[in-house]
Image (cartoon, rainbow, N blue to C red):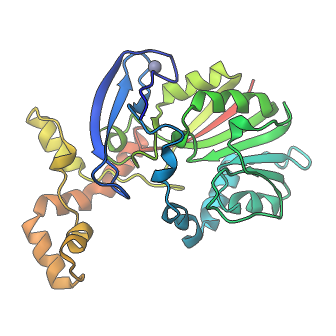
């Protein structure tokens, strides 16, 4: 484990926001999430070093990419954020963290010249376009070359986002576009409802820290889309948070009730209608929370406080 200072502004003034275990793989390992008091970037501190982090990405983690059909997501991604193909001939795309290569492949079929970066050894081999098996910041790439660089849910996993922004600022062509999806630390779900995937997410960005990163690396922010169309971050337990907040208390990870699915898993039970009914009658708060959660999320999208941000930037 290593202690770090703020990656965005270099400050050492940090305050602890919450602590949470690795829910997916190592439930007895807890991590501190801190916030920089100067620029409000969130991050894990202390954190697993680059040598230690691979333990938290067992091959199960990558199965997710194989099991779901992402075509709808790719259509959203390309049509809403990468609609520059009409204005440029054979535009060049670099997709960072391309996993099994499905997104660049999708873009290739739309007329793009594509390349991908995927350092993970557990992802599937790719032979239909150029793939780099190192992390972006270790690659020697042509400067001012790509018309677009994409990074879907990647930057929060890196140990040094500043290096990534700097590198992308260099390899983008003039007026080239950088499109990326990150979680939003200004959302209730990310900052107070324990929705982040810890410790795989190492950084928690805000609109202001994104702007600061982009400007320091020669890019400018064009727009941020607060959206649940590509990924969702549910505000589960928002009602419990509200009740605690109104009574002047802080919601802790240990206060979070067992969900119905986890209750079944823990007691090794099967899902039946009667069992669900009994569970619901014993946990009315949990059920109310669930019922109104989608409404709460729609409101947070309107207020630009949703947990997922899709950012579009341009090289200056
Ligand atoms: Zn800072």
Question: Quadrant of the rendered structure where residue 162 is?
Answer: top right
- Compared across the picture, whether 43 is left or right of 29 comes to right
State the image coordinates of residue 70 (x, y, percent, origin top left): 60, 66
Residue 39 position by quadrant? top left
Task: Estimate the x, y position of residue 68 in percent, counting from the top left.
Answer: 55, 70
Viewer-closest of 14 and 95:
14
Q: Residue at x 21, y 84 (%)?
A: 272
Above-or-below relation of 38 to 141: above
* Quadrant of the rendered image containing residue 69: bottom right
Q: In the image shown, does 50 or 89 lie closer to the viewer?
A: 50
Front-lying residue, 12 or 258: 12
The image shows residue 286 at horizontal and vertical percentages of: 17, 60
In the image, what residue occupies the spot 56% across and 37% down?
224
Which is more toward the observer, 45 or 245? 45
Q: Is residue 27 left or right of residue 242?
A: right
Q: Residue at x 41, y 27 (%)?
A: 3
Q: Residue at x 56, y 21 (%)?
A: 212
- Residue 76 drawn above or below residue 211: below
Tell me if 263 is positioned left or right of 299 in this view: left
């Amino acid at each position: 484990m290593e202690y770090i200072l703020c990656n965005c502004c270099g400050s050492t003034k940090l305050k602890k926001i919450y602590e949470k275990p690795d829910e997916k793989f190592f439930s007895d390992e807890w991590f501190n999430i801190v916030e920089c008091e100067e620029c409000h970037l969130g991050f894990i501190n202390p954190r697993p070093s680059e040598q230690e982090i691979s333990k938290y990405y067992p091959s199960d983690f990558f199965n997710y990419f194989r099991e779901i059909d992402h075509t709808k997501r790719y259509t959203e991604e390309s049509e809403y954020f990468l609609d520059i193909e009409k204005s440029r001939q054979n535009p060049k795309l670099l997709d960072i963290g391309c996993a099994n290569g499905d997104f660049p492949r999708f873009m290739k079929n739309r007329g793009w010249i594509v390349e991908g970066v995927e350092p993970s050894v557990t992802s599937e081999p790719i032979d239909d376009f150029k793939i780099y098996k190192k992390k972006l910041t270790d690659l020697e790439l042509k400067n001012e070359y790509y018309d677009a660089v994409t990074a879907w849910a990647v930057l929060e996993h890196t140990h040094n986002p500043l290096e990534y922004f700097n590198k992308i600022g260099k390899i983008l062509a003039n007026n080239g576009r950088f499109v990326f999806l990150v979680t939003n630390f200004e959302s209730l779900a990310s900052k107070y409802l324990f929705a982040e995937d810890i410790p795989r997410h190492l950084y928690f960005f805000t609109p202001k820290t994104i702007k600061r990163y982009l400007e320091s690396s020669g890019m400018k922010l064009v727009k941020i889309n607060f959206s649940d169309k590509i990924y969702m971050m549910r505000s589960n337990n928002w009602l419990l948070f509200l009740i605690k907040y109104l009574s002047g208390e802080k919601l802790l990870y240990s206060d979070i009730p067992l969900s119905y699915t986890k209750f079944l898993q823990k007691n090794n039970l099967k899902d039946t209608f009667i069992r669900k009914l009994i569970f619901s009658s014993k946990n009315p708060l949990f059920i109310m929370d669930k019922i109104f959660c989608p409404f709460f999320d729609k409101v947070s999208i309107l207020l630009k406080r949703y947990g997922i941000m899709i950012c579009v930037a341009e090289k200056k």
